[in-house]
Image (cartoon, helix red, strand yellow):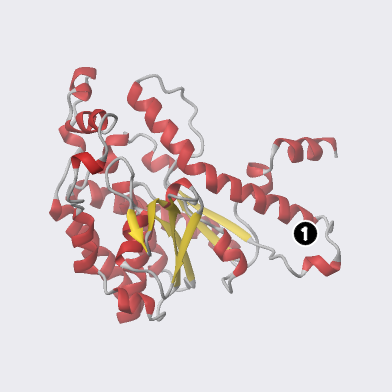
Amino acid sequence: MQGGGAHGAFTWGVLEAVLDDPTVDVRAITATSAGAMNAACFADGYAVAGKEGAKQRLEEFWTRISAKGGLTAKSVGSSWIDKMFSPFAFMQTLTNFASPYDLNPFDYNPLRDVLAETIDFNRVNAGMGPRLYITATNVHTGKARVFTTGEVTLDAVLASACLPSVFKAVEIDGVPHWDGGYVGNPALFPLFYDEAPRDIVIVNLNPFTRKSTPKSAADIQNRLNEITFNASLIAELRAVAFVQRLLEDEWLSPRLEGRYKRLRIHAIRADKSLCHLSVESKFDTSAAFLQDLRQRGYAAGVDWMAQCGRDVGVRSSVDVRGEFLGIEEQQAQAAE
């Protein structure tokens, strides 16, 4: 489950659709940022009362998020002058000149209170729900730090959602961490090596493709953020595509083949539902907006189950080789 600020409410709806379907069983979740919060809520609620408990905990979390308030999309007008002098634009400009160590010396983070009020992390780490993999970025090394069930703390989830321009780095065991989206949004590799199912369903919040060219400063920054936060996922999917090609074309020796999984990749994409939304909307925590995203996510989840549910356990519903093979592999395929 990807991160995406308030757009994570779309994933909330997707999860409800999945939980309502009796044919799907979630065994593991890898997630980043807002996705990590959804994952922790899911695991905690599931440990208490199964699928209904997971749905209840997710609703409690997003209801508390909206109660905390914040910027809303309605606070930003449509004209260029409204956008220039909006609260969001002001904060974006301010963070270009001052760090959170200057602007937020006491490191106030309303998400800390919401998470602490909603989630029992002892239950999350007891392992009674799906196994979790929460990704943050190690500031010192630039590598992914994946927190698994047993070490998913409040600080681990906050680290996974720590935008360095807004919050101080979250220190865990003396090591500072930033948002996991820079190195894994989400990280897929934990699912390759652990005893996770072969079917992987990606809830993609950031559009891979946009056919229009961004021209305003806000649109350029928004598209740059989407590309940045999709880069690690695309790289992993390209690696998956390459290994799957080796397996399918029987290019691996029998001695090596047993070390690799034949994965089935699926995706519930928010492209059509969210592509028209501005970057400002990722900070919109109004109840109406979050409920709208929830409904869009639920509809997308139901639609995916209707179209691709029969593929689970059988085949990939995403053409991984066609979408994510590198240029060299695509040329090789064309030559064949």
Residue 12 appears in the figure = no
Q: Nearer the viewer, residue 233 or 179?
A: 179
Direction from residue 265 to residue 246 in the image, left or right: right
Q: For the residue labelled by badge 1, is the local secondary structure a helix, a strand or a loop?
A: helix
Q: Quadrant of residue 257?
A: bottom right
Q: Quadrant of residue 275?
A: top left
Q: Nearer the viewer, residue 203 or 301?
A: 203
Q: Is residue 35 above or below residue 230?
A: below
- The x, y position of residue 39, in whole percent, is 38, 64
- The x, y position of residue 78, in whole percent, is 22, 24
Residue 80 appears in the figure = yes
Q: Amino acid at mark 1?
A: Leu
Q: Is residue 139 above or below residue 309?
A: above
Direction from residue 132 to residue 158 in the image, left or right: left
Residue lying at the far front in this picture: please name it: 174
Task: Residue at 59% x, 57% y: name it.
Answer: 265
The residue at which mark 1 appears reads as 247
Q: Is residue 176 above or below residue 270?
A: below
- The x, y position of residue 22, in whole percent, is 44, 73
Q: Nearer the viewer, residue 265 or 227?
A: 227
Direction from residue 257 to residue 78 in the image, left or right: left
